[in-house]
Image: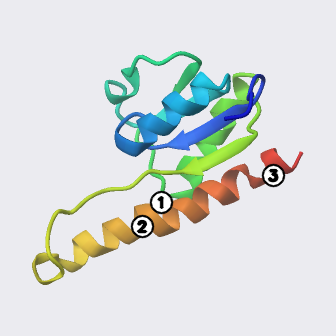
């Protein structure tokens, strides 16, 4: 992986699973990683170069919540070079057993959440 010194990456869901592995890889290449979480304990994963920005009730499927997260990043004097939309939720059920509410939550985080996160940081990244 190329040298990412001085680069800042926001990784949604960067505190566990594949997101944590991405966090470790980018941090190992020198990037500063911003891991947003609404679960402060989950964001305590020990990795170098990780900046934890905790927002109460961070909801990736809510534009105002994500904008608040982005504003906290800027208020901390940071910039955003890259966004990795990794967050997801799992409803370990077959389609037949999945309720409409479960389906709606998965779609809200996986699809709408990715669009909202990108929309919130796009102006920051463009500059």
Q: Are marks 2 and 1 in contact (CB under 8 Å)?
A: yes
Q: Residues within 10 Å of mark 3 (few under 14, many from 20)?
A: few
**Considering only order in the chain, which callout, 1 or 2, is on the residue closer to the N terminus?**
1
Label 1 neighbourhood size at 10 Å, few (<14), some (14-19), many (20+)?
many
Q: Secondary structure at mark 1?
A: loop
Residue that appears at 47% across and 60% down: 61
**Measuring 34% from the left and 41% from the top, which residue is drawn there?**
17
Residue 108 shows which numbered tag? Answer: 2
Dot 1 corresponds to which residue? 61
| Residue 63 image-quadrant placement | bottom right
Residue 46 position, x and y percent, is 41, 16
The residue lying at 42 percent from left, 61 percent from top is: 109
Q: In the picture, which quadrant includes the C terminus?
A: top right
Cα separation between marks 2 and 1: 5 Å
Q: Which coloring applies here?
A: rainbow
Residue 19, by quadrant, is: top left
Circles 2 and 3 in contact, beta carbons < 8 Å: no
Question: Which comes before the other along the chain, label 3 or label 1?
Answer: 1
Q: Which residue is mark 3?
A: 123
Residue 85 appears in the picture as rendered = yes
């Amino acid at each position: 992986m190329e040298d990412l010194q001085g680069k800042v990456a926001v990784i949604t869901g960067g505190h566990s699973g594949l997101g944590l592995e991405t966090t470790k890889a980018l941090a190992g290449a020198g990037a500063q990683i911003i891991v947003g979480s609404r679960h402060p304990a989950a964001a305590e994963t020990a990795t170098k170069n990780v900046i934890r920005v905790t927002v109460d009730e961070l909801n990736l499927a809510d534009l105002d919540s994500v904008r608040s997260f982005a504003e906290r990043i800027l208020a901390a004097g940071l910039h955003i070079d890259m966004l990795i939309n990794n967050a997801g939720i799992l409803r370990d059920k077959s389609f037949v057993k999945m309720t409409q509410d479960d389906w709606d939550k998965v779609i809200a985080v996986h699809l709408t959440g990715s669009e909202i996160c990108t929309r919130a940081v796009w102006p920051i990244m463009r500059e």
